[in-house]
């Protein structure tokens, strides 16, 4: 039945809310450490353990908390037959060794707990640990003296029953009168508990023995003695059973209250659409269920918890946190573990900090302050509090993703509206602007030639018409790119031809600025859309003309590098704004937010979209000395082989012949 050596497996410590629990936990922890095995610690609660008093129960719960801190899996179970419940738990979790304390001073009719556990689970190795026969200084405190009022009430109820029933002895038999006393015992057990019911049984028995008339009752008569003995036994058993039923009913009522509180809390959170609503619902239910003050602390983008914002509507329930409290909450958030009151970490702190662990990540910390810290040791209340924290975490995460979804929908609708507006404006304006550009150019070429002042006005009109036409073309191109309507006409071409074409088309936008080109000989063919790449170079040259002084110098360079064709357009102007090089490629972002320079900030966005459609990439940076540089990279690929000239000549001769 008992074994001092255990097989390598899971160790189970069985606690009984008595003086030997501390030795049981210590022995189980040592045994698990020696075997390198996991271990469990359980407490089976029933009427027997509750009779030991609340102080012994709280001490055992504290031992369970220490066992959990040392790596044990802890549980508080409910069951009248504690050995059977412990055996079922051992089978369910694969435990091979059970550790429990040796019992002292048991009655001869009482079967020891270790023997009953061996009968319920014969496959378990049992380790019987020596325990102190009397509670030590560290043991549970002495039980409080019972209140006298229930016992006085039970005595009064039995005496009142005697006053009513004893005069009926001439009419009724003693056994029938005894039933009236049993009814009183049942009522006392239901209302006052086990001890007062047993006292009521004894008072009723003595009343029948002493007060009955001799002519009707002779104690020497065997049948009456049996009736009274049965009355005493039935009263005793009835008191115990009724008391047990009362405790089970109270336990069921407590479970029902916790289940209802959890259900109502989950239902209230299910309709919350804002973080503030989650905060208020959580505070309200914690105040109602635990009489606690609570606050939810959320992290910022850097992962640091923010101070709670005071809510005037619930200011009386909002806790006031200090710097040390925020540090403890930050520890709980960073480690994903509870801290504060009732935990091994900072147990002297008045608050309990529970991390809000959602499915995706930790969403914050729930700081709770209860009036009685010892209440946090009660497993039912702590489990309910953990469930509240889990539901609050899920609600916070759900609200977060609702906000993300709403922002995404707003951005999508705004982008769709913006693209529709761009397409409508560009189509409606392109035809008249094209006519305006043609008429302005015809005006400058009219014969006879215009006067100097009129020619200046005509040139200005032509330039502005060209700028407006370029702007509308950019709008139309961006609308087409966003809608996926751009089809690339890819052909193997020389990049220097496209650079030259872009310079001829955009020379007027550069004004008096000088332009140098650095294009080495022998650049390979590249497969690209010439018209779109020309638009990219024109937009870059237009930017150089807008944001550089009139006497600036512009350089266009091309080179082959690591399988890529690199084309750079650089200038010696003021350069790009600090830290905004990547932002310039976004739509409607300009180099200078407030400026008299015309434009809407679409040129660079179009450039990047076209280059990325070719499978390339684009970047912007400042030069070491001064000025800005825009660099685009296109993949070189493998151009098709050129036909053999001799073979081509031979084929032509045969065809002519």
Image: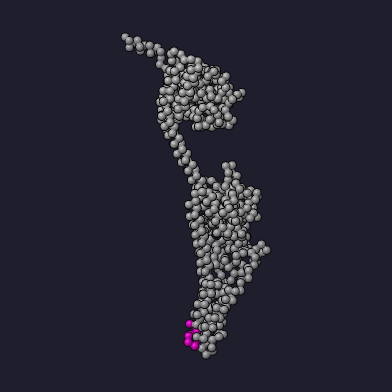
Residue nearest the observer in this picture, 266 or 308: 308
Residue 30 seen in the current view? no
Residue at 50% across, 30% down: 600
Q: Position of residue 129 (x, y in %)?
A: 61, 61
Q: Characterize the magenta stretch by its predominant secondary structure.
A: loop
Q: Assess whether residue 420 is covered by the magenta stretch.
A: no
Residue nearest the observer in this picture, 253 or 278: 278
Q: Position of residue 590 (x, y in %)?
A: 53, 30
Q: Which quarter of the rendering shows the C terminus? A: top left
Q: Which residues are magenta?
A: 169-176
Residue at 58% across, 26% down: 575
Residue at 58% across, 45% down: 299
Q: Is residue 36 above or below residue 536?
A: below
Q: Position of residue 126 (x, y in %)?
A: 56, 60
Residue 571 seen in the current view? yes
Q: Assess whether residue 174 is covered by the magenta stretch.
A: yes
Which residue in the rendered view is the most extreme toward the bottom? 215
Which residue in the rendered view is the most extreme toward the right? 137
Q: Which quarter of the rendering shows the N terminus? A: bottom right
Q: Position of residue 581 (x, y in %)?
A: 55, 30
Residue at 57% across, 78% down: 155
Disc tally is: 0
Which residue in the rendered view is the most extreme toward the top? 657
């Amino acid at each position: 039945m008992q074994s001092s050596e255990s097989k390598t497996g899971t160790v189970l410590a069985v606690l009984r809310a008595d003086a030997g629990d501390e030795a049981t936990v210590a022995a189980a922890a040592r045994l698990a450490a020696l075997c390198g095995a996991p271990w469990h610690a359980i407490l089976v609660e029933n009427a027997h353990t509750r009779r030991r008093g609340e102080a012994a129960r709280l001490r055992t719960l504290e031992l369970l908390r220490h066992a959990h801190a040392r790596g044990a899996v802890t549980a508080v179970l409910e069951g009248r037959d504690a050995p059977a419940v412990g055996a079922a738990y051992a089978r369910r979790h694969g435990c091979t060794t059970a550790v429990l304390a040796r019992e002292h001073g048991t009655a001869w009719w009482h079967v020891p707990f270790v023997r009953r556990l061996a009968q319920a689970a014969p496959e378990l190795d049992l380790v019987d640990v020596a325990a102190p026969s009397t509670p030590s200084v560290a043991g549970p405190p002495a039980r409080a003296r019972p209140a006298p009022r229930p016992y006085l009430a039970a005595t009064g109820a039995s005496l009142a029953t005697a006053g009513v029933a004893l005069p009926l002895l001439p009419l009724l038999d003693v056994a029938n009168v005894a039933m009236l006393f049993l009814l009183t015992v049942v009522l006392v057990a239901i209302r006052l508990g086990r001890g007062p019911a047993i006292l009521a049984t004894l008072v009723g028995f003595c009343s029948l023995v002493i007060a009955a008339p001799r002519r009707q009752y002779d104690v020497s008569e065997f049948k009456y003695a049996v009736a009274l003995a049965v009355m005493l036994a039935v009263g005793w058993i009835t008191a115990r059973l009724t008391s047990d039923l009362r405790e089970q009913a109270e336990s069921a009522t407590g479970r029902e209250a916790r289940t209802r509180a959890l259900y109502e809390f989950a239902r209230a959170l299910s309709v919350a659409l804002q973080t503030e609503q989650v905060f208020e619902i959580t505070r309200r239910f914690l105040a109602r269920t635990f009489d606690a003050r609570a606050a939810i602390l959320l992290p910022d983008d850097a992962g640091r918890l923010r101070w709670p914002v005071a809510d005037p509507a619930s200011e009386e329930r909002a806790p006031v946190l200090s710097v040390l409290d925020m540090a403890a909450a930050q520890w709980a958030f960073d480690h994903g573990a509870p801290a504060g009151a009732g935990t091994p970490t900072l147990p002297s702190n008045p608050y309990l900090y529970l991390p809000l662990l959602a499915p995706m990540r930790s969403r914050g910390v729930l700081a709770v302050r209860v009036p009685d810290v010892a209440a946090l040791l009660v497993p039912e209340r702590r489990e309910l509090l953990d469930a509240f924290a889990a539901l609050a975490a899920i609600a916070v995460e759900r609200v977060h993703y609702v906000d993300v979804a709403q922002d995404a929908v707003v951005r999508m609708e705004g982008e769709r509206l913006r693209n529709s507006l761009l397409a409508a404006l560009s189509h409606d304006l392109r035809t008249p602007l094209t006519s305006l550009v043609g008429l302005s150019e015809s005006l400058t070429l009219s014969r006879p030639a215009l006067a100097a002042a009129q020619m200046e006005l005509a040139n200005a009109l032509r330039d502005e018409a060209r700028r407006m036409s370029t702007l509308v073309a950019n709008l139309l191109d961006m609308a087409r790119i966003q809608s996926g309507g751009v089809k690339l006409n890819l052909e193997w071409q020389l990049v220097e031809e496209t650079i030259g074409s872009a310079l001829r088309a955009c020379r007027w936008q550069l004004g008096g600025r000088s332009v140098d080109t650095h294009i080495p000989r022998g650049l390979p063919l590249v497969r690209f859309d010439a018209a779109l790449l020309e638009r990219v170079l024109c937009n870059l040259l237009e930017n150089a003309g807008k944001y550089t002084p009139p006497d600036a110098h512009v350089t266009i360079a091309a080179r082959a590098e690591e399988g890529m064709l690199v084309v750079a357009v650089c200038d010696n102007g003021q350069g790009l704004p600090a830290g905004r090089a990547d932002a310039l490629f976004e739509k409607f972002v300009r180099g200078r937010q407030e400026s008299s320079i015309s434009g809407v900030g679409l040129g660079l966005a179009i450039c990047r979209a076209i280059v990325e459609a070719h499978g390339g990439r684009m970047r912007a940076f400042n030069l070491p000395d001064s000025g800005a540089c825009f660099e685009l990279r296109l993949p070189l690929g493998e151009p098709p082989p050129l036909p053999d000239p001799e073979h081509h000549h031979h084929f032509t001769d045969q065809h002519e012949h």
